Image (cartoon, grey):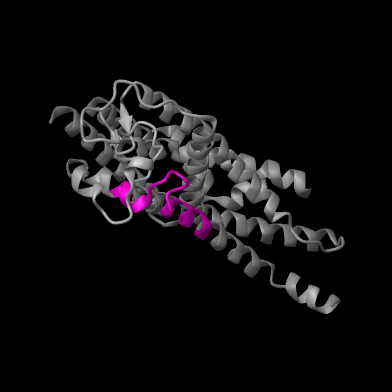
Amino acid sequence: MPGAFERLLSRRRAITVVGLLALCALAWLYILTGAGLGMSAREMTTLSLFPHKTAAAQAMPGMDMSGMDMPGMAMDMGPAPATPPAWTPRTAALMVAMWWAMMIAMMSPSAAPTILLYAQVHRRAVAQSQIQDRPAPTGAFAAGYLLTWLGFSVAAAGLQWVFGRVGLISDMGSQSRWLSGGLLIAAGLYQLSPLKQTCLAHCRAPAAFLSTHWRPGATGALRLGLRHGVYCVGCCWMLMALLFVGGVMNLAWIAALAVLVLAEKVFPAGRWIGLVCGAVLVGWGVATLLV
């Protein structure tokens, strides 16, 4: 039995990779099945991309809009109600969970290199200090990172509630070209800003980040994960706000943002990809306001 346990520990990297893949897969599965909101992400994406075909979409197999509890969405084909249905505590919890699942699904792939490097650095630190080997608190580091995105998810859900109450957004996306254009321009300008570049530099250089902010033990790992999460949120928060434009559960926008974030943080030309994206977003926002 001890021999089997030692062999298991020798495969820590593989275990970490499998764990991250499983976490990301579960998050995507939760999104695809509708995040407990009574409507699959595929159906929400269809409504977001083709809102003028809502009547046809209502007849899609498996869609029962009459029993849905979707804040901000008109359930009939007539005029939208003046005041969207109030959120219950259950609805608020589901919205926070939905946002957090989306953040896990989108951000886990780009965070994986840093998490794996943390485990490797911990093993080297143990070897150099010649102390008894023990598993790296990689879970604590990942937990700290994900807790940061949970805080963002709470704020995003609150902003979604505010936008919904004043009629700026529905579950199909932005209902105001001023909001859409404003968010697109703001996201584009932020892509070009020094703060974005500073946060992105930390995310693109995990070795430098770990060597600068290293803390031992599980508590240190949790704090390190929280710090890395803060830089990551600082890098990507305006991109995530674009979900208000295209639809919070729009799979096309979720996938596009996930690919963009991964390219920015991992690809050699990631910084330039982000800058070009910023220019495109500003142009898109201006066109949205003018057309």
Q: Is residue 127 magenta?
A: no
Q: Is residue 36 magenta?
A: yes
Q: Quadrant of residue 33?
A: bottom left
- 161 vs 285, nearest the viewer: 161
Q: Name the spot of residue 240 as percent of width and height, x first.
A: 41, 39
Q: Quadrant of residue 284?
A: top left
- Split into 4 quadrants, where in the image is the N terminus? bottom right
Q: Is residue 213 above or below residue 160?
A: below
Does residue 239 appear to the left or right of 219 in the view shown? Answer: left
Residue occupying the point 57% across, 42% down: 229
Does residue 237 appear to the left or right of 166 in the view shown? Answer: right
Does residue 137 appear to the left or right of 31 in the view shown? Answer: right
- 57 vs 126, nearest the viewer: 57
- Split into 4 quadrants, where in the image is the C terminus? top left
Residue occupying the point 79% across, 63% down: 127
Q: Quadrant of residue 62?
A: bottom left
Q: Is residue 29 above or below residue 171?
A: below
Q: Is residue 41 above or below residue 285?
A: below
Does residue 281 appear to the left or right of 34 in the view shown? Answer: left
Q: Name the spot of residue 213 as percent of width and height, x first.
A: 67, 43
Q: Which residues are magenta?
A: 25-45
